[in-house]
Amino acid sequence: MIKRILLCLLVMIFGFTVEVHAEESLELTAKSAILMEAKSGTCIYEKEADTKLSPASITKIMTLILIFDALDEGKIHLNDEVTTSAYAKSRGGSQVFLEEGEVQTVETMIKCIIIASANDASVAMAEHLAGSEEEFVKKMNERAKGLGMKNTVFEDCCGLTDSKTHLTTARDVAIMSRELITHYPQIKNYSTIWMDTIIHKTKQGEKEFGLSNTNKLLKMGTSFEVTGLKTGSTSLAKYCVSATGKKDGVELIAVIMAAPDYKARFPEAKKLLDYGFSSCTYYKDEAMPKLASIPVTGGNLDSVELKYMGQFETISTKGENFKSIEKKLEVEEKLIAPVKEGQKVGRLVYSLNGKEIGSVNICTKGAVEKAKFFDYFKQLVYIWGI
C-alpha cells in the first residue's frame, strides 16, 4: 500500500508514467491464474500460469471437446443411446449414480458432465467413443498436444485421479477452454443451465434425479453474462474453475487453480473477469463505406459491382479508443476482362494512431467475360443510336 501511494505521488508531482503489475493489483490467493481473451487468445493477466498443477474435474473440458468433435464429425448424435458399464458406475466421486446397464442419451450424458461434473457419465462417454477409458485418454493427450498444451498429461477422463503426474497448467486450461467455447459455442446451452433433471431408467423402475450446476458464478450477480464453464476440486488440486463470460462483444476466459478454499475460487474468477472487461474494448464496423463499381476493359460489360468479403471487428486488450479509427479504401482503378466472380480487387484498411490494425478484402460481385464480336457490335449500335 505504501509503495502504491509513493508511486501515485511521483505521477502527480513529476508526471512519471508508472506501470503497476496486474498481479500486485488483483491480489489473488489462488496459486495459479490466467485471464485470456477468447477470440484472439491474448493473455491479459497471469500468475504462475505455467506451473504444473492437478486440475481435478477441469479435466472434463478435454473430455467435452472430444465428445463435441465426434458430434461435429457425425460419429455420434445427441439422441444416440449410451450404456453405462460396471466400471463407469464404480468411479465414485462426483456422480449422478448411473447404474450398470443403464441407458442414457448422449445429450443427457453431456448435461451430467457439464452441470453436475459426473465422473460416471464421463467414463461412460469415454467408453462409448473409444472402447475404454484408457484409449480415450490417449486421444485426450493427442488432442492436447495438437492444441499446443505443452505442460499437460491426462491419466483419466474426469480428473478423479489424485495423481502427481495427472497435471496441467492454467495456461493450458485456458487454451482448451478457448477451443471448446469458440469451436463449439453450443456448449453454452448446457453450461448455463442452473438446475435440471434426468430420469434414471433401471430394472427397479424410473426415478427422477436432480442436477445442480457446480458453477456458482451463475448465481453470484455480475455485470457480465456468465457463459460457463467448468469447476474442479480434490484434496490435491484444491479449488479450481475455468470461468467464461461475455460483455459488449468481448468474451473472456478466467482460470483459477489451487485456490485455498471453496470461498475463494468464484470471487477471484469474477475479479479476473471484471478486470478484463474493464480493459477490453470491442469494435465492429457497422458503417463500412459504400463501394462504387469498377470499370472493366475488353469485357462484355463496362463495369462490375464490388462487395466486402466480411465485416471488420477487433478487440483491444489495452483499452484503446476506437473512435479515432481511420478507414482507407485501396481498390484497383480498372480491370481487364475476363473477370471472375469473387476476384479480389482491393481492401478496406483500418488504422489506429497511424498503425494498421486490420483490413477487409474487397472482391467482385459478379463475373465479366471477354468481349466478343457481337458485344462490340452492340456497343457501336448504342453509340451511333442505330
Image (cartoon, rainbow, N blue to C red):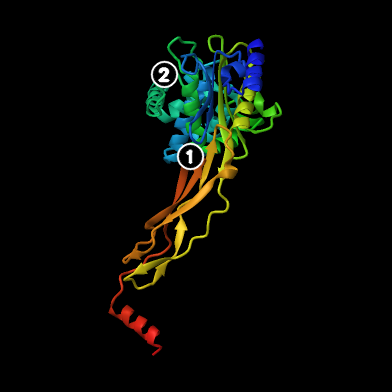
Asked which secondary structure carries label 2, the reply is: loop
Q: Position of residue 160 (x, y in %)?
A: 51, 15
Quadrant housing residue 368: bottom left
Q: Residues within 10 Å of mark 2 (few under 14, many from 20)?
A: some
The answer, for residue 85, to whether it is visible in the render is no
Write down the residue under mark 2. Answer: 151
Q: Residue furthest left?
A: 373
Q: Nearer the viewer, residue 380 or 172?
A: 380
Quadrant housing residue 240: top right
Q: Is residue 11 above or below residue 311?
A: above
Q: Residue at x 52, y 60 (%)?
A: 290
Asked which secondary structure carries label 1, the reply is: loop
The answer, for residue 261, to whether it is visible in the render is yes
Q: Position of residue 169 (x, y in %)?
A: 47, 18
Q: Is residue 264 left or right of residue 299?
A: right
Q: Quadrant of the C terminus?
A: bottom left
Q: Residues within 10 Å of mark 1 (few under 14, many from 20)?
A: some
Callout 1, which amino acid?
His
Write down the residue under mark 1. Answer: 77
Q: Are marks 2 and 1 in contact (CB under 8 Å)?
A: no
Measure the alpha-carbon separation of dots 2 and 1.
32 Å
Which mark lies nearer to you, 2 or 1?
2
Q: Nearer the viewer, residue 359 or 16?
A: 16
